[in-house]
Image (cartoon, rainbow, N blue to C red):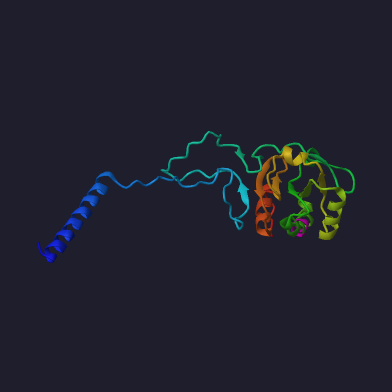
């Protein structure tokens, strides 16, 4: 047998071996371990730092011809992110007032009330104080009462903050956080808008600007034109 014939037979044998190996892979498949994708735990949901404040209000009905989602919660009242029930009476509230006295929500029946749960370390709270003071002054004749409720800080810290921001409306002291727990507040600031009958009409968690403030105040002051 010539050298050329030996080379040709070697090439043919190599091709045959490759074809056989390919057939075996197709028939039985490669041994590839299956690794499940990683998933974040449910309690660590990513959030957007630029997301708008969460607003809680009555849900809009689905469009005609669209099936409503099935949920176990009642359609009304709505349970907001802060744990407050929109459309039901506000929880009891009685806290010491900065400078002396007591803030009691029951004594404010007949007045629309805007309560902000806040803290002095909160940048948006600092920005909101002058705006809140402006609304409190402009709509005092319409009965509006604006209250800031500081959570878990001492009186001296709150007094310094009030002086720095020029606050002219009442500040309550929730030194041990009991009021925030009772109202199930989950974030600062939390704005609660209560009508003259003591019913919670809106809850907003997060910082808000004058346009949102005016729109929410309009909900608790019917017949009054509220402007930013």
Can residue 109 be spotted in the picture?
no
Residue placed at 66% from the left, 40% from the top?
83
Image coordinates for residue 221, horizontal then vertical, percent: 70, 49
Residue 73 found in image quarter: top right
Image coordinates for residue 193, horizontal then vertical, percent: 70, 46
Can residue 203 be spotted in the picture?
yes
Q: Quadrant of the N terminus?
A: bottom left
Q: How many marks can you see?
A: 0
Residue placed at 65% from the left, 54% from the top?
215
Q: Is residue 70 left or right of residue 153?
A: left
User: Is 146 colored magenta in this rendering?
Assistant: no
Image coordinates for residue 222, horizontal then vertical, percent: 67, 48
Q: Is residue 5 left or right of residue 120?
A: left
Front one among 159 and 112:
159
Q: Is residue 8 left or right of residue 101?
A: left
Q: Quadrant of the C terminus?
A: bottom right
Residue 183 found in image quarter: top right
Q: Main secondary structure of the magenta part?
A: helix
The single residue placed furthest to the bottom in the displayed view is 4
The single residue placed furthest to the front in the displayed view is 1
Image coordinates for residue 111, horizontal then vertical, percent: 76, 45
User: Is 131 colored magenta in this rendering?
Assistant: yes
Front one among 223 and 156:
156
Q: Is residue 38 above or below residue 133?
A: above
Residue 163 found in image quarter: bottom right
What segment is highlighted magenta in the picture? 130-134
The single residue placed furthest to the left in the displayed view is 1
Residue placed at 22% from the left, 49% from the top?
23
Q: Is residue 42 above or below residue 164?
A: above
């Amino acid at each position: 047998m010539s050298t050329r014939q030996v080379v040709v037979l070697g090439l043919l044998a190599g091709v045959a071996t490759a074809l056989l190996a390919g057939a075996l892979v197709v028939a039985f498949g490669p041994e590839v371990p299956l690794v499940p994708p990683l998933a974040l735990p449910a309690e660590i949901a990513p959030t957007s730092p630029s997301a708008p404040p969460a607003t809680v209000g009555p849900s809009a009905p689905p469009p005609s011809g669209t099936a409503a989602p099935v949920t176990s919660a009642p359609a009304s009242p709505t349970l907001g992110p802060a744990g407050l029930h929109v459309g039901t009476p506000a929880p009891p509230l009685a806290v010491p007032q900065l400078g002396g006295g007591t803030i009691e929500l029951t004594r404010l029946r007949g007045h629309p009330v805007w309560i902000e749960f806040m803290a002095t370390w909160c940048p948006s709270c600092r920005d909101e104080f002058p705006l809140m003071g402006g609304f409190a002054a402009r709509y005092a004749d319409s009965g509006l009462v604006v209250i800031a409720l500081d959570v878990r800080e001492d009186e001296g810290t709150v007094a310094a903050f009030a002086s720095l921001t020029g606050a002219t409306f009442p500040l309550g002291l929730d030194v041990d956080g009991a009021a925030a727990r009772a109202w199930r507040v989950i974030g600062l600031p939390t704005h609660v808008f209560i009508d003259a009958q003591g019913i919670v009409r809106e809850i907003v968690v997060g910082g808000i600007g004058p346009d949102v403030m005016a729109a929410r105040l309009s909900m608790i002051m019917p017949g009054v034109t509220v402007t930013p």
